[in-house]
Image (cartoon, grey):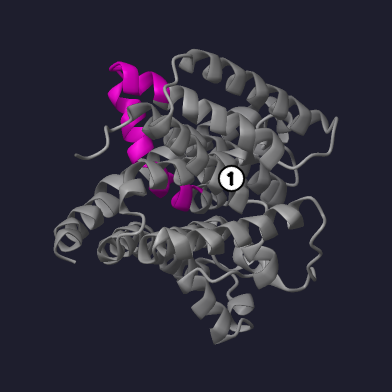
Amino acid sequence: MSAKRLNLIQVFRGLAAVLVVFAHTDLIYNQNLNQDFLFKITTFGGSGVDFFFVLSGFIMFYIHQKDIGHQNKLGIFLFKRFTRVYPLYWIILTSKILSSFIFSDSSHLKEIGIGQFIKAFLLFPQDRQILSSIFLGVSWTLSFEIFFYLMFGLLIWLKPKFSFPIIIAWLSGVFFHFIGVLQLPQENILLQFIFSEYNLEFFLGCLAAYTLLNKRISNGMLFLYVGLFLYTLSAINYYYEIIEVSSVMTFGIACTLLVLGAASLELRKTINVPHFLLFLGNASYSIYLAHGFFINHITKILNQLPFHFFQNILLSSVLGFIITIIAIICGCIVYSYVEKPLLIFFKPKAVTT
């Protein structure tokens, strides 16, 4: 029997995407206009990435925990995961590169070797500065997603007596690197990637799903309240820079509690969720990939008009909010007319893989 669909988890996916969009509006405002958006109060929205990683770990374990140790399930697992990520990513990335050739100064593209292009299209770990300036800035997070799928695929491919020691050894390396015991050369992008602290957030998501499936949780609201409280504290700390601490320890743990609380509530009773929030969750990947393109170009176009929109701080903030909403709507359009047809196209093939 398939796992119960958890609508609140899907809503969280949409919320995470919206948080990232607002954070990137401030980033693009600084790049294109040399000013802040909404006095930088939305910059904590980068925590949407932490939310995504925890959600990915949760969803993978919640849906595929019965596939662990069953090698015959590996093919369909990898096909579903890879077709979920790569086709739309390739379309958005190609569009970004073509627009740079047509509308922008493309000299910097010609300076990049073919190897960097191959890495970008395969989502192989790269320097984030290159990704932001040449390719898709958010694609560094997709590299972690793909790596997580491969590591989870290892659990499916091998029997637990073989896969568990490998996963435990790897997670131990990640943890020791996180606390500073394991020192790795900063210039080695691949090693830094493999043992990055972000991998702990996927593990936290898996741990939340394991707890949900194996323990009776009767106080889901308590987890939600504590998670929301910690998330709020983390956002305040991020804005005021009170304590320098890793987002894994702040937003990662808070998101884990939010996910565990929401999922436990929904397993016990049906929770009616507004359709537009579910749609936003369904469109979250398209919003996540495409929003930067739209915010960047809309901002540049408005800034070139002879109306000086961005000289007034209040008007600039209002415009930024409107631009952010437009970018989200455009992402939803991309979902409806590009991503959704792709998912429909690949779905029958996943069944026969």
Specify whether 74 is left or right of 139.
Answer: left
Decide which of 178, 318 is in the foreground and name it.
178
Q: Quadrant of residue 129?
A: bottom right
Q: Quadrant of residue 5?
A: top left
Q: Position of residue 68 (x, y in %)?
A: 36, 55
- Vertical order, 14 against 153 (above or below): above
Residue beneath disc 1: 201
Q: Quadrant of the C terminus?
A: bottom left
Q: Is residue 334 visible?
A: yes
Q: Is residue 267 magenta?
A: yes
Decide which of 305, 87 is in the foreground and name it.
87
Magenta: main secondary structure: helix
Specify whether 274 is left or right of 135.
Answer: left
- Vertical order, 177 against 26 (above or below): below
Which residue is found at the position 57% from the left and 79% from the top? 116
For label 1, the crowd category at 10 Å Cα-Cα, with few meaning under 14, some 14 to 19 and many 20 or more, is: many
- Vertical order, 34 against 111 (above or below): above
Of helix, strand and loop, which one carries label 1?
helix
Please name the amino acid that badge 1 sits on. Glu
Which residue is found at the position 60% from the left and 65% from the top? 131
Q: Position of residue 31 (x, y in %)?
A: 70, 52
Look at the image and give the residue range highlighted in magenta: 264-291
Specify whether 208 is left or right of 80.
Answer: right
Decide which of 338, 324 is in the foreground and name it.
338
Q: Is residue 146 visible?
A: no
Residue lying farthest to the front in this orientation: 161
